[in-house]
Image: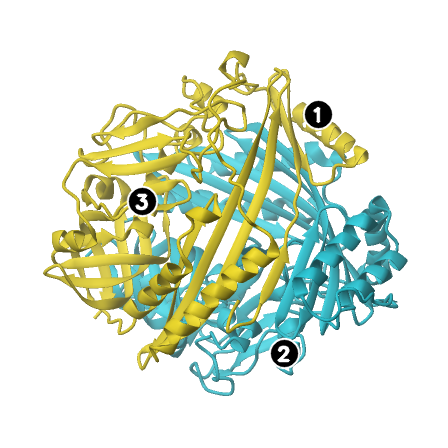
Amino acid sequence: MNGGVLALDRARTALLGPAGLDEAAISRALGELAGGGADLADLYFETTAMRSWRLEGGRVTQGGFSMRQGVGARAAHGGQVSFAHSADMREGALLDTVRAVRTLARHGDAGRHGQGIALTRNPRVHHLYPAIETVAVEDAAAWIALLRRIDELARMQDGRIVQVDANVRATDTTILVAEADGLLAGDVRPMTILSLVVIAEQDGRRARGQAGLGRRAGLGGFDAASTEQMVAAANMALNNLDAIPAPVGEMPVVLGPGYPGVLFHEAVGHGLEGDHHRKRLSAFDGKVGERIAAPGVTVIDDGGLSGRLGSLGIDDEGTPPDRTVLVEDGVLTGLMQDRLNAGLMNARSTGNGRRQSYAHLPMPRMTNTFLANGTADPADIIASIDRGIYATEFDGGQVDIVTGRFNFTTIEAWLVEKGRLVAPVRGATLIGVGHEALRHISMIGNDLAFDTGMATCGKQGQSLHVSVGQPTLRIDRMMVGGQAG
Amino acid sequence: MRHGEVETAERSGTQGLGLTVFHQGRRGVASTASFDPAAIERLVDEAMMIAQHVQPDPDAGLPPAHSLAYTGISPLLYADSPRDPDTLLTAAMLADRIASEVAGVDPRLRVGESVAVATEGLWALATSDGFCRSIRRSNDGRWSVMLAQDEGGSTSAFCQSQERSVDALAPPEQLVRTAADRARAALGARAIASRRCPVLFAPRTAMSLVSDLAGALTGMAQFRGMTFLRAPLGQRVAASHLNLTEDPFEPLGLASGPFDSEGIAGSARPILRGGVVEGLFLSSVSGRKLGMTSTGNADGFYNLRLTSSAPGGDWPAMLRMLGTGLVVTEFQGGKTDPASGNWTQAIKGLWVEGGEIVHAVTDVTLAGQMPAMLNGIRAVGDDVERQGALRTGSILIDEMQVGGKA
């Protein structure tokens, strides 16, 4: 269980106590913040503890620990946002931060003092992830043992694995949001990420493979099966040892299940964030209600999926997560909103108001974004390709919101000829335009899967954990940028 | 600012304290953003706890005391400039007004955002060998975004100026007009056919090639084998007319510094001379791993400048030298695999024939192998630009694989 009074109590202990703050002080500061006649004002308190271990070449070479905390104060008058933040959360610093926002805003009578705002504690609990601590000191030996198991498993795969670099990073974040409408909400967000990079070598050729697992859990969330999943890194490196130059040109592409769903994050999701629409910057501007993809294409953003890193009990503005259908059976249906943009667009927040930290402003951001299942057998989809690419892992991706042009780079892919995998190919960049790629989807598999918990999303310099997913699918025409002319 | 209105006004305040302890060859690291006594006590406990679990490494440990820069040249990194909210607001308003004027005379243009940022910071390093020095830095930034639109679609472009003093910033007129020119130049983009052809990287994309090269020469990349240039010292890794120099002491340089986070000073030195590697970027740990000593680069490289002894020229001259081929103006996304040197990018650019720009290109990929690309550099332009630590002119590469849909 998490959220509700439990999380508020945790926030009081972790955040307010050390700073000597209480709810009355927050109420006063919030009143001051909203006092200039703001349409929206909030205080966001956050504390984070992070612990990491690194096992390199079978030796524990690094450990790290960091603690960070602070408060962000925001006030908006229409679309004009004033924002200040401070790592010092004591009442004097808090009031100084709030006054800085008032000064920056240049609205209303700067000398007018706001009334304290009566706060209502958010009673809503959630069961998406537990309110646990993951960075306990006494767990060090167990974390290191976990890395050793992964290291051994990776080396056992093949004698050509010459380097193994295994890392774990556990993070505890506790947040408290106070909104000018009186909402006081808290959340405890545990997160652990395992990552592995291996190098395989043969005859002077070297190839890299990577894998990772991210969960909103502590040590207990990683069993033997999950450590075995990490071996994917070794397989990737071994495959890439034999990689041939990728072909170049427009051709059919099959994207495997899971992380390749980043296609929909880039090609659809970013273009459906409320801020881009309010500023009329999106390539999808004015297209809500129009058919933008083939029938059968349904894309959803759902912040309430259990076990996914994009899930949140409440977003960073205290709003519970929605399930927003972005594209339904090929028709553009929904936008993702935070409070600011929803307020300005006469819409409601969809629980997509997220921020990297207290020192960053919230924006409409994705949570878990995926293409819904189709009916095709994945084997039939590969078999349908005469000559093309089958890509199973990418290293990130980007989209230009204004043009809708996206790209991503393969780190594991094969050349397909006559329906068969011929050989692994070297990393190649795949490019396309969102609405064109969607129209060229011709087969959708029945094997929906999500990424393993390593997906991150960058927007205007802010990085967040998200989740992406899709079943195997075929795109009839896509530009593949290999080295083999 | 956009359309005469402030979109976002922000004041940031950050602080941090980091502690590194060495105990019998074991290293522990911890940091805190809170300076409360309780937080600092926890910081010490955590660093000591980590040191107990990390395995001893004979190569870890503080650098030898005699190697520390207790005294020495301290390049100017702080300039006293107006950085109050009014100054920034006025700067952003001026740029926004110019943007409206520029957009007002060309129906294809739309105003994007205009931004002004100022930062001041203080950083201090103290070690148990009695080293204690501090660095005060300032940073001023301005940028403008412009959008262009025609029947073929929309495009956006930006231009920025980043300096340590307000006086050194590019004037707003120049930023706005450059952003507008870049946005307009990308209009009317057409697909091209896949082919092998010469490629000219405009300075702000050429920088990423320099950055990939420098990244391959860092100590940890060398030690971990995460580099496409193995055992490179004394080897020719790039065309023989290329020189790369490092200068930590350039006054108000964006990547200048009197010492690194271990307290060791860098030096003005050649990294590449005649295409041959003469220096690596080493910390004390990576230096020991490789049987060498620190070069004062624990935090990466200082100001780097790529030059060439081959004939270069201004931008039009570089286009003439390109002849018929592709100009890269912007990277849209891609990856350099540090282990294999496999290089792949989606790009924005221009198609050039007979030294003249014919049209903008769209849906184009570019691929190569870093070692071959570095050896294939034919010329470096005189059209030098700086971004952060890197300074280079445009870079002409003899031949690369271009991918296109036409």
Decide if residue A257 is in sight here: no
Q: Are marks 1 and 2 in contact (CB under 8 Å)?
A: no
Chain where mark 2 sits: A
Chain where mark 3 sits: B
Q: Nearer the viewer, residue B283 or A436?
A: B283
Q: In the rendering, at what x and y percent does residue A44 appear?
A: 73, 58
Of the two numbered discs 3 and 1 in the rendering, the one whose residue sits closer to the viewer? 3
Q: Quadrant of residue A343?
A: bottom right
Q: In the rendering, at what x and y percent does residue B116 appear?
A: 51, 57
Q: Which label number is shown at residue B317?
A: none
* Furthest-top residue in this view: B66
Q: Amino acid at mark 2?
A: Leu
Q: In the rendering, at what x and y percent does residue B198 appear?
A: 16, 53
Q: In the image, is residue A335 above or below residue B226?
A: below
Q: Residue at x 60, y 17 (%)?
A: B25
Chain that appears yellow: B
Sequence-earlier tag: 3 or 1: 1
Q: Colour of chain A?
A: cyan
Report the residue marked by disc 2.
Answer: A344
Q: Tell me how far mark 3 sits from mark 2, CA to CA.
A: 43 Å
Q: Amino acid at mark 1?
A: Met
